Amino acid sequence: MRAPKTTTEAHELVAFRRQFHAHPELAFQETETAAFIEGKLREAGFDGIRTGVAETGILATLKGTNPGPTTLLRADMDALPVQELGTPPYRSTRDGVMHACGHDGHMAILLTAARALARRRDEIAGTLVFCFQPGEEGYGGNRVMIEQGALEHPHVDRTFALHLYTGLEVGKIGIRDGPFFAASDQIFLTLLGRGGHGAMPQLSVDPIVASAQLVTMLQTIVSRETAPKDTAVVTIGKIVAGTTHNVIPDEAELTGTVRTLDESLRRTMPERIERMAAGLCAAMRLQYTLDYEWGYPAVVNDAAMNDVVRAAALRVVGSENVVDPHEVVMWAEDMAYMQNERPGAYFIVGARGHDAGLEPQHSARYDIDERALEIGVRMMTEIALT
């Protein structure tokens, strides 16, 4: 791995990441984070800064000296409601809040790249928009930023974003054309039976037994109703029912997630789930309610924009360290909204080392191998100058 250009820049990069990690803020509450970023941008000479976009978001514009497209580079800002269990010296100082998904690193990467590019304005063709976005973790902050003009003034032509990924070794870049991250929707099912004594089930209509049947039935949507070439997941992650060991309750509540890559398959899922719930409840004498909540669409990469990422990755890490195509990742990511509006590419940067970056995203012991940060900066800088 090539050494950073300057010791000062490398020190700032790690210091920024640790500052963000130690002071996490939840979705749409990133006020201190935003103030820190704004201050560092102004210190670097930025004056085209829009603040308060989607509550706490920032858009910073840098015009090059040569004609070219307007390119948006994005980092997400919010932390998760997780109590950090790891013990790094920069661990979270806030109980119950933690950067457990790499957003601290994303911000440090984009902030460092922005400051470096401000010194290289003469090499920039077109305009760069540095987008620091709040509320990615389930709140759709990206969509709110679009609604508040993030893709206009100036009109954005193309978008790029990265994600640090502990599923990939540090020093590697993951790229995939077409769908890369999954669409994510939620299921809220309530099965309504009739409660009674656990020793006399014949006098009740048991929603717990029905729930167990339904969880199994729903798995056949993927195994028997979806083509093997199409990727889908139906998971019931929470069941709430009953109060004690010998009472059959009146109802059971099931909550789950549906992940898909293909939009046409995605649109069929509510009908399939309801058909199974209706059939089961008819057979077992229950009533039901189903609320299906549409979430983030799939992240779909534009092939031409991915070619820009490929060219940058070859220069930064070399062909032997480019994983292309990388396997699909069934997380959801609200960068999908911008990529639905403009050609864009989303890629992953390996963050797993021998001694760090060993835990998965959203783990209470999540951390990264900080060598990945420099690779992220170099990737964003190369893309910006392409």
Image (tube, rainbow, N blue to C red):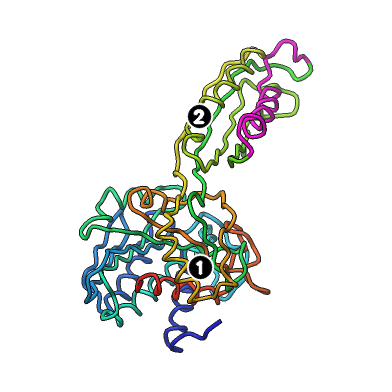
Q: Nearer the viewer, residue 283 or 199?
A: 283
Q: Earlier in the sequence, mark 1 or mark 2?
A: 1
Question: x, y percentage for residue 354?
Answer: 68, 74
Question: x, y percentage for residue 57?
Answer: 32, 59
**In contact (CB < 8 Å): disc 1 and disc 2:** no
Question: x, y percentage for residue 14?
Answer: 48, 78
- Residue located 50% across and 75% down the image: 375
Q: Secondary structure at mark 1?
A: loop
Question: x, y percentage for residue 306?
Answer: 44, 60
In the image: residue 384, left or right of residue 284: left
- Residue located 53% across and 57% down the image: 96
Could you say which quadrant of the image residue 39 lies in? bottom left
- Residue located 51% across and 54% down the image: 81
Q: Is residue 211 magenta?
A: yes
Residue identifier under label 1: 93
- The amino acid on which the numbered mark 2 sits, given as a three-letter code, is Thr
In the displayed image of the protein, which residue is found farthest to the bottom?
Answer: 7
- Residue located 50% across and 35% down the image: 266
Magenta residues, start to end:
200-228
Distance from Cα at disc 1 to Cα at disc 2: 44 Å
Question: In what quadrant of the picture does the C terminus appear?
Answer: bottom left
Question: In what quadrant of the picture does the N terminus appear?
Answer: bottom right
Of discs 1 and 2, which sits in the foreground?
A: 2
Give the answer, above or below, for where 109 lies relative to 252.
below
Marks counted in the figure total: 2
Residue identifier under label 2: 268
| Number of other residues with Cα within 10 Å of mark 1, as a class: few under 14, some 14 to 19, many 20 or more | few
Q: Is residue 225 magenta?
A: yes
